[in-house]
Image: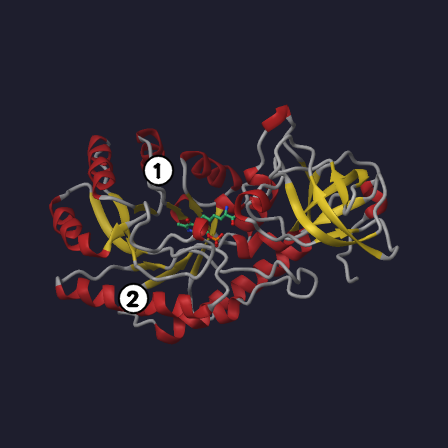
Amino acid sequence: MLKGTFPVEKFKQLSTPFYYYDMQLLQQTLDVVKAESGKYGYHVHFAIKANANPRLLALIAKNGLGADCVSGGEVRAALDAGFPANKIVFAGVGKADWEINLGLDNDIFCFNVESLAELEVINELAAAKQKVASIALRINPEVDAHTHAKITTGMKENKFGINLSQLASVTDRLAEMKHVRLIGIHCHIGSQITDMSAFRNLTIRINEIQDDLAAKGIVVENLNFGGGLGIDYYHPNHLSIPSFDNYFAAVHSLLQLRPGQQVHFEPGRSIVAQCGTLISRVLYVKEGETKKFAILDAGFTELIRPAMYDAYHRIENISSDEPVELYDVVGPICESSDVFGKEVELNKAHRGDFLALRSAGAYGEVMASQYNCRKLPFAYYSDEL
Ligand code: LLP
């Protein structure tokens, strides 16, 4: 079976489990992002929630991208990694006062505001500092992203964003506020979206929202389409860079821009997923009555996506070329959901073999936990081993 290329000899010196990042692939991905977004002058803010590893953030910042943050901790991580404050956008339904103050003190580019209640607080906190906060309204565009229920966000019943039906009352109230300035509208419809028609539908909806706002005399300078571009979890070896060309073109082909408007995106997964792999050793091969289990030293504490979203991650035995057999690949955590895959085709596995859990660079390391008193995973980088 076709497998990724990994420095297995070097891995033998290291204790597992750990994340391994292919920094060359990350750079190639960033080159494509810059080239494709650059065709239309679009601004790209990396969604830090996908991966806050400082080495990755530093490389992404060095390539000139902005940052999309959803907490004060992420705003700090972005600033520490070298993202300029004027390229930081800050979303999140529950921003605490200290988090808003952190954004205000650093003069970040924009707060993506998710409710009228939040807007009132930003206005008050900015007034106390005699500042004017730049804000975008996060609107719930009611566009179906056709993705997993736990990662879809743009429909009406979500906790995120302001419903279309309430937009007019929010903009009316906004007009009375002296310490916030409306600079944009923002939408995010979900994650792991592979059907470009969802982004086309979003673009059409943004055109409509713009028309409604224009009828009230409101024209904003910035349009933010959020993130959500999906990746190919099944073919990490040949489709390692997502189709950023189709993604930006889907928006560009339909978007009715008004003079001077700037367009922003917040991709996370599509930038970092394929460069990251979780490397684990097989602890035991357990022969059941009807099946075999490969029991790993990594569990959902290191990669929670399969347990949490039934997500598929391709698993490769990078230590063996023996004939393929079927295994249930499981972790050591004391929970029956600690399963990475059932009936997985692996080259015959032995104690000590390295298994690679692919496409784990997004929402992998950053979602790790210490459940069962486990240690957080280490990370190694292709340019340092
Ligand atoms: N912007 C906003 C407002 C978001 O809520 C998100 C993701 C993004 C951008 C980045 O989306 P991306 O380009 O990465 O799809 N833990 C889940 C994914 C949760 C996504 C949450 N929001 C997973 O492992 O699949």
* Amino acid at dot 1: Gly
The residue lying at 61 percent from left, 53 percent from top is 312
Counting from the top left corner in percent of width and height, residue 95 is at 33, 36
Toward the viewer: 91 or 191? Answer: 191
In which quarter of the view is residue 107 placed?
top left
Residue named by callout 1: 103
Say whether residue 303 is visible: yes
Q: CB of mark 1 within 8 Å of CB of mark 2?
A: no
Q: Is residue 208 left or right of residue 241?
A: left
- Considering the numbered disc 2 on the image, is that residue within a helix, a strand or a loop? helix
Residue named by callout 2: 205
Counting from the top left corner in percent of width and height, residue 232 is at 60, 61
- Considering the numbered disc 1 on the image, is that residue within a helix, a strand or a loop? helix
Mark nearest the camera among 1 and 2 is 2
Counting from the top left corner in percent of width and height, residue 293 is at 76, 43
Image colouring: secondary structure
In the rendered image, the vertical position of residue 26 relative to residue 198, given as above or below: above
Q: Quadrant of the N terminus?
A: bottom right
Q: Quadrant of the C terminus?
A: top right
Toward the viewer: 302 or 168? Answer: 302
In which quarter of the view is residue 236 placed?
bottom right
